[in-house]
Image (cartoon, rainbow, N blue to C red):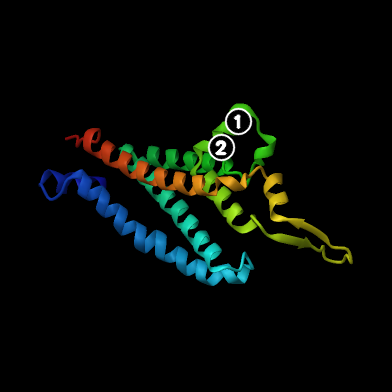
Amino acid sequence: ERLLYFHEHSSGCYGPGAYVLAKALCELLPLRVLPVFLFGAIAYPMIGLKPTAEAAAWFAAVVCLANANASAMFNCIGVACANTALGTLLAVVVALVSQLLSGFILNKNSLEGAALGLTRLSFLNYAFEALMINELDGVAIVIQPKGMDKSFPTTGQVILDQIGVDADNFAADVATLCVWLVACIALSYAILKWFVKETR
């Protein structure tokens, strides 16, 4: 695709802005948005998550944003790396670090200082936090282990506290995902316009 871009760009077919915008739009709707809403419409009620239309809509929106962020970030890496092997290696490292710092592998309550600050470098951290708040904030939960007659009532807030999630961060998390998405697309454009040159 890189060679095709160089050929068509040098022929004057389009500039870097048109390429980045077209690629973003063509990938976002058919590959990032529609599948998520289809998946959400089928899976959300079957999983038994919060049974409100608003919660289901926010679930789909946050998953869409996380999916779009991953796509934009890896496109940005692809634009920046002329070597396919290097780009693949870098994308894998970024994906693994993002997952590690997201909050669903490491409990943020176990992290301190700079290590806790590193979780803010992962877009998955914001998506995970927003999804947990969407599903657990304001709900009452009764845990009844299989084979036991005793039940244990708790609240979603207790679970959020246990995993180090602040329920007041929902709007900030969604806004941060939006900013990351725009920043990744803008960075792809900037790299393509000013740093990527065809070598002959």
Establish if 95 lies above or below 111: below
Establish if 116 lies above or below 42: above
Q: Are marks 2 and 1 in contact (CB under 8 Å)?
A: yes
**Residue at image x 58%, y 41%?**
100
Mark 2 residue element: helix
> As rendered, which of 124 and 91 lies closer to the eye?
124
Crowd rating for badge 1 (residues with CA inside 10 Å; few <14, some 14–19, many 20+) = few
Residue at image mark 2: 119
Mark 1 residue element: helix
Residue at far right of view: 149
Establish if 135 lies above or below 180: below
Residue at image mark 1: 115
> As rendered, which of 121 and 156 lies closer to the eye?
156
Task: Give the number of callouts.
Answer: 2
**Residue at image x 60%, y 30%?**
115
Of the numbered discs in the image, which one, if any, rests on residue 72? Answer: none
* Residue 48 appears in the rendering: yes
In the picture, residue 136 is in which quadrant?
bottom right
Q: Position of residue 119 (x, y in %)?
A: 56, 37
Residue type at mark 1: give it.
Answer: Ala
Q: Position of residue 70 (x, y in %)?
A: 43, 48
In the picture, residue 90 is in which quadrant?
top left
Q: Position of residue 44 (x, y in %)?
A: 57, 67
> As rendered, which of 46 and 135 lies closer to the eye?
135
Residue type at mark 2: give it.
Answer: Thr
Quadrant including the C terminus: top left
Mark 2 and mark 1: Cα distance apart in space: 7 Å
